Image: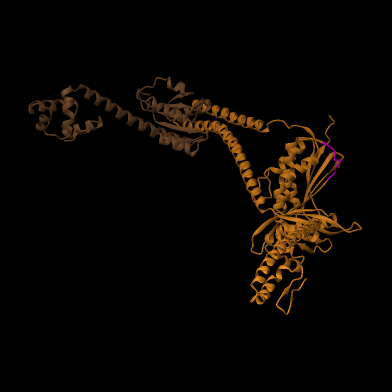
Chain colours: A orange, B brown
Amino acid sequence: MHRPVVASSGFVLFATGVDLFHVTTISQVVAVGIGAVSLLALGLALFMYLASLRLAARAKELERRVVARTTELTAVNEKLLKKINERQAAKDAIPDPEEKFHQLADHIQEIFWMMDAATKHVIYVNPAFEQIAGRTVASLLDAPLSYRENIHPDDRVRFLINLDEAAKTGVFDEEFRIIRPDGSIRWLRSRGFPIRDQQKNLYRLAGIAQDITDRKAAEQALRESQAELARASRIVTMGELAASISHEIRQPLTAIVATGSATLRWLTQQPPNVDEAREAVTGMVRDANHASAVIEKIRELLKGSSPQLRRLNVNEVVREVLAVAANDLVREGIVVRTVLAPDVPSVLGDRVLLQQVMLNLITNGIDAMSMVTGRLRELLIHSTGHPDGALIQVQDSGKGIDSEQMQRIFEPFFTTKAEGIGLGLSISRSIIEALGGRLWAAPASPHGAIFQFTLPVGEAS
Amino acid sequence: MSESDPMVYVLDDDASVRDALARLLRSVGLKPDLSASAQEFLQKQRPEVPSCLILDVRLPGKNGLDFQHELAEKNISIPIIFITAHGDIPMTVRAMKAGAVEFLTKPFRDQDLLDAIQLALERDRAARREKAERASLLARLESLTPREREVLPLVVSGLLNKQIAAEMGISVAAVKVHRSKLTRKMGANSLADLVRVAEKLGIRGKAA
């Protein structure tokens, strides 16, 4: 940078390269100097003009350079930004397991749970637990077995038994009720999966529990309407049958009563009209015989079509009937165990009739256990080969049958139930015997009863 | 049994019931007449004697209640005692509303049926009496001259002879003649008697 030099004579000497900044300063100096010399002022003005032109050119050049430099810097900067963004994006793409898990676990509506397989202590539940169970996660983790207290008493035993089983097998799938602190009841379905350590030992269970209360309510409504329908159609059928039977029987009875009344009148006349009376009594005998023929006809009618004999796998029949009875079994808190021999021989039977027998035996088992408290309600269904063909056993842990009852339970109209009509076992035995098998009962140990039947092997066709 | 002995018709498709009812009726001195179908009953010549019908609700191809309706439409008036081997309350209500005497469920006590028959026959007797009376009154009405038939409603309205004369534009003397003739022809002894007879025929006095 060139500095202006001020001479003592008042002349101003300029060095080349005065920059724009100093123009004002020069002007001020010049102004002091020109007071006496106007000519000099004119020259100076010209000089100033020329100088300003040069200055403008320089400024322009400077500006150009700045712009160029700025462009350069901007480009570099953009490159850097791009790189940074790329790195960030790459970084974002790499999962951060903890964060991802929390985003999932904190926002999903199902309960995520994890427990120690040995102690059954809950190790983790996600916040959905609070929404569904109505208590805090912290309260559960503080008392890691306290989830048991939330389970409905009717479901608790079954739940705990199956959880014990799950600790060994790693497989858990239960539907059960919980009672929330406010007393409301929710249905949950909980499924668990095994977590194994490096030695393949199962050491934890993890799972998902879902609130299925709405689904259960819908199922319940459907079941009720189905049951209602079934009941209604049964009543209609029974009602029609009863009406038809009663009509057929009432006709001859009407004739007998009317003729009997007439006979009494003939005989009480003075003198008695024996001829009319004899004829009337003959009519009564005929009518009574007619009534009896009507009953015989109805019996034949009720026998209906002959059974449809087919080769059947009894295990399939057992599973079908268990599916039908599942709701009752769950409602009564009954644990069902099936030991079905895969190689059980095929039998010759009528599927529908066998289903009726199975359903009857299972229903009896359920009823027998309905009053059982303080011990497990357990229904064991066992199928196996037998010298006679196949053997199917249905064992309950109910109140059992005393020896006096045991003598009579297969009699028609004998029942130990408050609301039974006493035909189930009688009909079941008739069916099994009609199929060439045997049905009998025995006490079970330590509680309950075993009902079992054999069926002959179906001929290979 | 005399000419006017009542008739008890039995309509039931069950032969044993028909025969038994016939025996029961004969044992109390009633005269049964049996039909196995509605058609058979309709084709019968029914003497003009007190009668009733014991009708089974279930007829071949027909409902006893519908047959009750059919009889009413054919203007056959006969008291009906329903018998049924499967009656229900709505059916009973319907039958009774349509004028049935009784609704008995088979098998019924003989006395219940006999009581119902007595009631039915009594009703039919009353109905027949009324019908006969009405027929004779109609015959009397038929015997009136057109003028007398014109005067009758005015008389039973309680109008005085001169009012009737003014109304009809005839002389009081002529009214007197018509009046005494029609009263005699209608078998009435007094104005009150004439009013009652006219009422039975559905003739109302004209409003004055």
Q: For the stretch drawn in magenta, what is the main secondary structure?
A: loop
The quadrant in which the N terminus of chain B is found is top left
Could you tell me how many numbered marks the image carries?
0
Q: Nearer the viewer, residue A266 or A194?
A: A194
Q: Is residue A111 left or right of residue A297?
A: right
Q: Is residue A155 left or right of residue B128?
A: right
Relative to A43, does residue B144 appear above or below in the rendering? Answer: above
Q: Residue furthest bottom?
A: A8
Q: Is residue B53 visible?
A: no
Q: Is residue B42 visible?
A: yes
Q: Residue A166's spot in the image, x, y percent?
A: 82, 56
Relative to A174, does residue B164 appear above or below in the rendering? Answer: above
Q: Residue furthest right?
A: A199
Q: Residue B188's spot in the image, x, y percent?
A: 18, 30
Q: Residue A238's spot in the image, x, y percent?
A: 61, 38
Specify the segment rendered in magenta: A340-346
Q: Is residue A342 magenta?
A: yes
Q: Nearer the viewer, residue B109 or A303?
A: A303
Q: Nearer the viewer, residue A370 or A22?
A: A22
Q: Is residue A396 magenta?
A: no
